[in-house]
Amino acid sequence: MAAPRAKRDRLAPRQRRASVRSSVTRISVVDLGLLAAQVLGLAIAAAGALATHPLLTLVGSVVSIGSQVAITVLRSPINRALSFIGMSRAIRILLLILLSVFLELALASASAADNLRHGATVWVLPLAAVLCFLATFADQWRAAGYSGAGLAWRGLGRWGLHDSTPAPSGRASAVVSLVSTLVLTVGVPLVLAINGARVDLVVVGTVAAVLGFGSCIASIVLRARLRALGTRADRVVRLRAALDAYAPEVVIYVSAPASGTYALNVWIQTANAFDSRTLIMVKEAAHLANMEHTDIPVLFAGRARDVEYLTVPSVKVVLHPTTANKVFEIMRLRGLLQVFIGHGDSDKVSSYNPYSKVFDEIWVSGPAGIDRYTALGEGFRRDQFVTVGRPQLAEIATVAADGSTDVTLPRPTVLYAPTWEGFLEQSNYSSLASMGVAMVSAMLAMPNPPRILFKPHPSSGHRRPDMGEAQEEIARLLHEAGSDHQVFDTGTVSLYAAFNNADVMITDISSVLTDFLASHKPYIVTNPRNEPLADFLVAFPSSDAGSIIDTDLTSQQGTGFVEAIAHALVGDPDGRPARIALADYLLGPISADPVRAFVDQVSAAVDRARVRYPEPRIVPVPPATESKSIPSASSAVEGPEGTESAEGAAG
């Protein structure tokens, strides 16, 4: 064990330097301003002490300690960066306390300074100074006693592991430790400035001492609670034991920005019906709060080695709704069938990215998905593709041949559901900023305006502020136009509810358009780049059965936007056969139970994985258990009462 420990010791300085570099890169103008205020406050307080000017010292102390309180509350990376060069928060607080001592010495010849030489002030003020410094030091000692970031879970109670909860952050104790110093370094100059009596100094010192002592006790209690949670390695071991007991066969693996949880949410209801035991593994903690409710166990594994340890031997298939870079953390593991399921079927380039060829299988809704990939000429194999339909279609009401549906609408209704701007301008198909406000205004100005539903994409404005501004303007217009118009929230369920409550949809090139085709209702597609009509139809086959509108609200097909809306609102029965044929091409024939069809495909994938990888997968044992076997799930909750229920991941 000596060699590995020596290696860790050599790596530790590098890791600390890397961590500091990361902190420095995250320092903002506000952080620099707070640091400047702290330094300036120290200088002012020192000058006031040397010049025997109590009020000046008071102002400097307030500015300096106030900026430190702000740095602590905001969790500024300044703290970590300064600590690396020896200027920890405790040291900076010590400087403030020393300044108060300098102030007392500077005032020794003043009449008010006589109060410092007699009675309880001789020992109360030094004791308070010591306790204030210890309070700050104890808070840092408490914070250093726990490292639990990047690990959280829920849904494993039946297998011996209670849901994780956030560990106590201790921010309150950090602020209290600064408040005690504030009372001392500001109170003493203030009392002296107003020629206060000895009893006033005793009161200030006592209050500061009590607060400092209380902060020390709070830090000790918090550290004890954190220690009771066990080391991070201990939690990985217990989590591994519970997952071994659960024995999942399928992992839904998601990595995306916080605004991208919708990519997981579109699959939650389908996953709830899986016959195979399933685990949802996310790489970003925000998804835990943003995802829809499910009884499927959910795991946040922030580190690559957690993914390695916790993808237990029972796992056979990994389903990928996204293609973010972190998918490689699980794709590098051997013996797993890696399947790309995406989160929508569309003509967007992101829906048939050449990157996808790294997956063992690519599941598409219908023949169009295969044609998109093979047209790239990027080395995709025909045996990579599996046509699985679109299980989400079960929630969409299909209009009958006579134009009737199961949904009764209050009056002719138009849904405007634009996509977002994408991560790159190449994948920006959104009409929101270029023509969204104009289209909504034009519909509201019609002689008999339709009811308008507005369903923005949850990531709109993520990259371009003008998208968010247009979204707010449309919401304002609809609000002012009357209560019968509606702005839907950003949830997946509300999208399909909006489908069912609309006669016509206006949308961009996206999976929203493809899914809406299942309703067989008329639709209008935007052309925000004003591409030539022939090129547009070739590039985006999903638009072939709809009206296409340019940014000036005219159509190269010979009709204007308002005319296209009016024609679509009467049902466009002549266009129905084309919409049905296009829906079959893009989505595959709609089965009686699309969810069941997809569930069967997942079970079949597990069977294929067993044939492809007949040998048991070897999964590394977490380091904390190298010299002993992993405990069983039944022993995972042993220990002091309540220990496991307090499991958590400090953010």
Image (tube, rainbow, N blue to C red):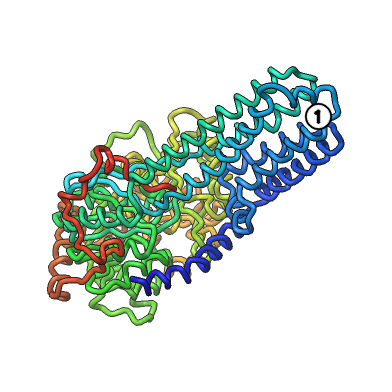
Residue 485 figure quarter: top left
Tell me which residue sits at (16%, 75%) in the image: 613
Q: Quadrant of the N terminus?
A: bottom left
Provide residue 237's location: percent of width, then percent of height.
26, 57
Provide residue 204's location: percent of width, then percent of height.
65, 24
Residue 605 figure quarter: bottom left
Q: Is residue 402 visible?
A: no
Provide residue 47's location: percent of width, then percent of height.
83, 40
Provide residue 140's location: percent of width, then percent of height.
52, 46
* Residue 446 in the image: above or below residue 143: above
Tell me which residue sits at (84%, 39%) in the image: 50
Left or right of 566: which side holds 597? left
- The residue type indicated by label 1 comes to Leu
Left or right of 583: which side holds 94? right
Front residue of 378/587: it is: 378
Q: On the image, numbered disc 1 is attached to which residue?
A: 55
* Residue 150 in the image: above or below residue 486: below
As helix, strand or loop, the secondary structure at mark 1 comes to helix
Q: Is residue 313 visible?
A: yes
Front residue of 250/198: it is: 198
Tell me which residue sits at (26%, 54%) in the image: 239
